[in-house]
C-alpha cells in the first residue's frame, strides 16, 4: 500500500536478526519464498544481471529484495517512507532523524563492543550486524490532500547477509542494484556554503547559466570553469549486456570546486552540454524572478513558485522526482541532502532536454 494511503499505526513493524534476516525474510530465500513471506505482494520493478544476481522492488511492502547468484536472498533494502519500521535491540532504525539514529547506533555499538564506521553516504555502518544506514527526503500530505516534499531527511537501511557485510556497496550484487562507485564519498558532514560566500551567476533560460552555454563541448565547459578538472565523470556503454565493450558515452562531469555538474547529450555523435545542475550545498547563487534558488529551504521556493502559479503569473511543471519549475523554461528546483535536512539546488536545461532525474 502506498504510504499516503496508510492510516497511522498501519505500518508493519519488523525485528532485525543481524546477518540472518529481517522480519519474515531470511537470507538464502529464493524469490518465490520472499514473495510468499511478504504476503504475495506483486513486485513493481525488477532486473536480472548476467551474473545471475537480481533485485525485485516490492512497492506495496516498501522493500527491495536483492538476490545473489543462484537467486538466493543476500540483502534487503528498507524504504524510508513506505517500508516496515525495523527495530534492532531498542533502536528504531527507519523513518527517524538520521543524526539521532546515528547516535543510537554508535552508542549500541560501543555497548556491545563492535566496530562502527561511516559508509559512502556519511551514515553509520556496522559489519557485525550487516547494517548500512541511509537517508531519503521525507514527503507528506498537504492540508489539501496532495503529496508534497518537505525539508526533512529520514532514515532508511540496507541489511545484508554475512558474505556482503564487510563492504556492502562494494559487492557486485549491490552494485547491480545501486552503483555508487562514481558518487562523491561523504565523510559524515554536510557543510553548506554561506550565501554571502557564493558567486552569483546569471541565467538566460534555455541558453546558458553563468559562463556555461548549452551546446558547449566538455573541453569548452572545463575551460569556462577556469580549467577545472572534473572530480568525477559518469558515462555508459550502449548495451547493458556488453557494458565494457564498444564506445563509452559521457553523461556528466562533476566539478566540485565550481559546485556544478555538467550533463551531456549526443545530438550529432559528440557530447555537448544539454543541462547544468548547480549544487545546493556549494554551488553559485542563481535567481529567478527575485527568488534565490540555491541553498535555500525547498518548501520556501516551492511555496513561492506555487504562489506565482496561483496568481497566473506563470505555469508550473513537475519533474519526474517531484521537482517544481516554471513552465516553458526547462528548469527544475531540486533537493540535496544537508545532514538532517535538504537544501535547494537547480537543474537548468536546454529547450529539448528531457530530464529523467
Image (cartoon, grey):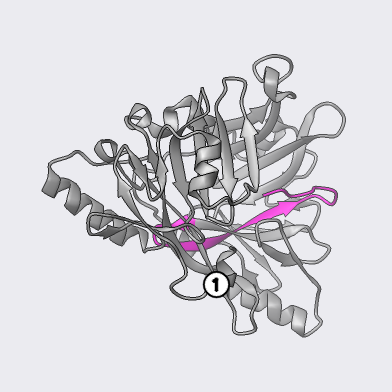
Residue 73 x %, y %: 46, 34
Residue 257 seen: no
Q: Would residue 308 be counted in the magenta stretch?
A: no
Q: Residue at x 29, y 61 (%)?
A: 100
Residue 89 in the figure: left or right of residue 73: left
Disc count in the image?
1
Q: Residue at x 81, y 82 (%)?
A: 312
Q: Which element is circle 1 on? A: strand
Residue 272 seen: yes
| In the foreground, 237 or 336 | 237
For the N terminus, give its image quadrant.
bottom right
User: How busy is the neighbourhood of tag 1: few (under 14 within 10 Å), some, or many (20 plus)?
Assistant: some
**The quarter of the displayed image where residue 292 is located:** bottom right
The segment highlighted magenta reads 337-357
Residue 247 x %, y %: 74, 18
Residue 277 in the figure: left or right of residue 116: right
**The quarter of the displayed image where residue 289 is located:** bottom right
Residue 260 x %, y %: 59, 46
| In the foreground, 65 or 247 | 65
Residue labelled with disc 1 = 140
Taking the view exactly as shown, the residue that stands out farthest to the top is: 245
Vertical arrangement, residue 122 with respect to residue 239, above or below: below
Amino acid at each position: 500500500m502506498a504510504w499516503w494511503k496508510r492510516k497511522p499505526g498501519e505500518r508493519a513493524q519488523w525485528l532485525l536478526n543481524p546477518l540472518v534476516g529481517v522480519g519474515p525474510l531470511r537470507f538464502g530465500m529464493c524469490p518465490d519464498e520472499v514473495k510468499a513471506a511478504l504476503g504475495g505482494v506483486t513486485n513493481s520493478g525488477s532486473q536480472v544481471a548476467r551474473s545471475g544476481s537480481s533485485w525485485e522492488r516490492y512497492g506495496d511492502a516498501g522493500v527491495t529484495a536483492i538476490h545473489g547468484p543462484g537467486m538466493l536472498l543476500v540483502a534487503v533494502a528498507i524504504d524510508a517512507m513506505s517500508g516496515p519500521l525495523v527495530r534492532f535491540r531498542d533502536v528504531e532504525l527507519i523513518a527517524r532523524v538520521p543524526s539521532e539514529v546515528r547516535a543510537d547506533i554508535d552508542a549500541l555499538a560501543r555497548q556491545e563492543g563492535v566496530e562502527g564506521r561511516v559508509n559512502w553516504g556519511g551514515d553509520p555502518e556496522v559489519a557485525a550486524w550487516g547494517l548500512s544506514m541511509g537517508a531519503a527526503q521525507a514527503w507528506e500530505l498537504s492540508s489539501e490532500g496532495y503529496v508534497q516534499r518537505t525539508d526533512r531527511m529520514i532514515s532508511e537501511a540496507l541489511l545484508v547477509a554475512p558474505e556482503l557485510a564487510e563492504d556492502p556497496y562494494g559487492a557486485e550484487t549491490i552494485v547491480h542494484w545501486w552503483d555508487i562507485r562514481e558518487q562523491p564519498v561523504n565523510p559524515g558532514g554536510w557543510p553548506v556554503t554561506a550565501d554571502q560566500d557564493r558567486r552569483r551567476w546569471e541565467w538566460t533560460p534555455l541558453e546558458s547559466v553563468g559562463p556555461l552555454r548549452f551546446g558547449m563541448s566538455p573541453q569548452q565547459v572545463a575551460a569556462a570553469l577556469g580549467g577545472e578538472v572534473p572530480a568525477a565523470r559518469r558515462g555508459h556503454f550502449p548495451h547493458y549486456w556488453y557494458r565494457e565493450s564498444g564506445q563509452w558515452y559521457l553523461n556528466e562531469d562533476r566539478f566540485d570546486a565550481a559546485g556544478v555538474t555538467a550533463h551531456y547529450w549526443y545530438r550529432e555523435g559528440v557530447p555537448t552540454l544539454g543541462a547544468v545542475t548547480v549544487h545546493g550545498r556549494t554551488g553559485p547563487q542563481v535567481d529567478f524572478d527575485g527568488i534565490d534558488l540555491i541553498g535555500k529551504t525547498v518548501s520556501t521556493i516551492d511555496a513561492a513558485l506555487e504562489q506565482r502559479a496561483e496568481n497566473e503569473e506563470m505555469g508550473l511543471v513537475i519533474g519526474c522526482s517531484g521537482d517544481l519549475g516554471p513552465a516553458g523554461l526547462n528548469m527544475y528546483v531540486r533537493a540535496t541532502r544537508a545532514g538532517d535536512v535538504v537544501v535547494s539546488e537547480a537543474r537548468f536545461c536546454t529547450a529539448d532536454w528531457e530530464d529523467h532525474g
